[in-house]
Image (spheres, grey):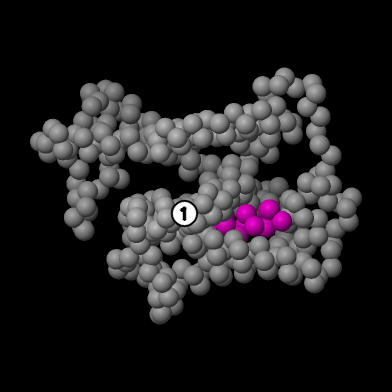
Amino acid sequence: MGSATSNPMGVEWLAMLMGLGFVLSFGYWCTDFLVMQRAMAAESMMAARRTPLVAAVPKMLFPFLVILPGMIAIALTQHHGASTFSLPAKPDGSLNYDLVIPLMLRHYFPSGILGLGLTALMASFMSGMAGNVTAFNTVWTYDIYQAYLRPKASDAALLWMGRAATVVGITISVGAAYFAAHFNNIMDLLQLVFAFVNAPLFATFLLGMFWRRATGHGAFWGLISGILAAAVHHGLTQPHGATTLVKGGWLGHVWRTYPSEMAQNFWTAIFAWAVCFLVTILISLVTRQQKSDTELTGLVSSLTPRASEEHVVWYQRPATMGVLVLVLALILNVIFW
């Protein structure tokens, strides 16, 4: 990790530590509305704090789902020949690993079980899609439309707007699929979107939760500045071998060429977070604080009373679960280093 040219990801230690380990990872867990909805629906504050910790356990198994099928496909192709299992090639000549799981289902499963496996794949896709659509229309209908555009809208109007937002959201998703076709894999696109959205949003959440002096004006302009910083960085940089402006360089001058799309995404996230963080602080210091300490109770960490954990069994306490999750993550990193 000492140099971007020393590993196949094209990422040096700083981009990995700050871009992925801090900005994108924390941003995903702390600002993704699909994740936050689960915590908001919890029966108590203690249960809400346990929500991301419980979710972290199956999340740590996710690399097995991503990496192992590809390794098995390589073994089948190289050791058993293309006659038993073969991956189609992409236009650039590389193997298309996006089709590994469907092709492995066809290779290993008999007809009846094959239908069950494909149904499970579709069910997992639909559950994720449903969750994202629900989060999209909820944010638009209640947090934007009702809060700012039509505060006195009736329940019937809000229901109609929620349905319309669902149709619009799905339409945008279909268009995004054509946009995603320009990328080597879906993870590169996801990290790019997170760099534009989650990275500056994480800076705003971080300051809002731990700094009582943060103001609404600072948060708003910090978010705008962070997104603009991500856009400028993306427009002035390109990954090596890019053939489309979708991957960057659309401002006309390429300031830097990164070894990979992932490296470009990590640095985009770093710039977006840093600019949002600094701008929010500066504007908050020169604008008037709109909320009193009483109004900020429950929102800012230093002003919020800590929930008592005396009645909770030790192994159900968030701190204990957090330590356990951290130890498991460290063990997995050592094993697969």
Q: Which quadrant of the view contains residue 284?
A: bottom right
Relative image position of residue 137 (x, y in whole percent): 59, 50
Tell me: residue 53, above or below residue 208. above
Residue at 23% x, 32% y: name it: 106
Does the magenta-highlighted stretch encompass residue 246? Answer: no
Q: Nearer the viewer, residue 165 or 328?
A: 328
Q: Is residue 305 left or right of residue 283?
A: right
Q: Position of residue 58 (x, y in %)?
A: 50, 31
Q: Main secondary structure of the magenta part?
A: helix
Q: Quadrant of residue 117?
A: top left
Foreground: 126 or 7?
7
From the top left corner, tell me how far across and down residue 285 is, in percent.
Answer: 79, 68
Q: Amino acid at mark 1?
A: Trp
How many discs mark residues in the rendered view? 1
Quadrant of residue 288 in the image? bottom right
State which region is magenta.
197-207
Determine the residue located farthest toward the bottom in the rendered image: 252
Quadrant (top left, top right, bottom left, bottom right) of the C terminus: top left
Where disc 1 sits, the SS reads helix
Check the image and report above or below for 228 versus 129: below
On the image, the x and y values in percent for residue 270 come to 54, 61
Residue shown at 49%/70% (left/top)? 233
Q: Residue drawn 50% across and 63% down?
A: 268
User: Could one spot residue 270 in this view of the protein?
Assistant: yes
Q: Reply yes or no: does residue 203 show up in magenta.
A: yes
Mark 1 surroundings within 10 Å by alpha-carbon count, few (fewer than 14), some (14 through 19), many (20 or more): few
Left or right: 51 in relation to 111: right
Residue 173 can be seen, yes or no: no
In-image side of 137 versus 172 (left or right)? right
Q: Residue furthest front?
A: 2
Residue that badge 1 annotates: 13
Residue drawn at the location 68% of the way across and 23% of the way down: 316
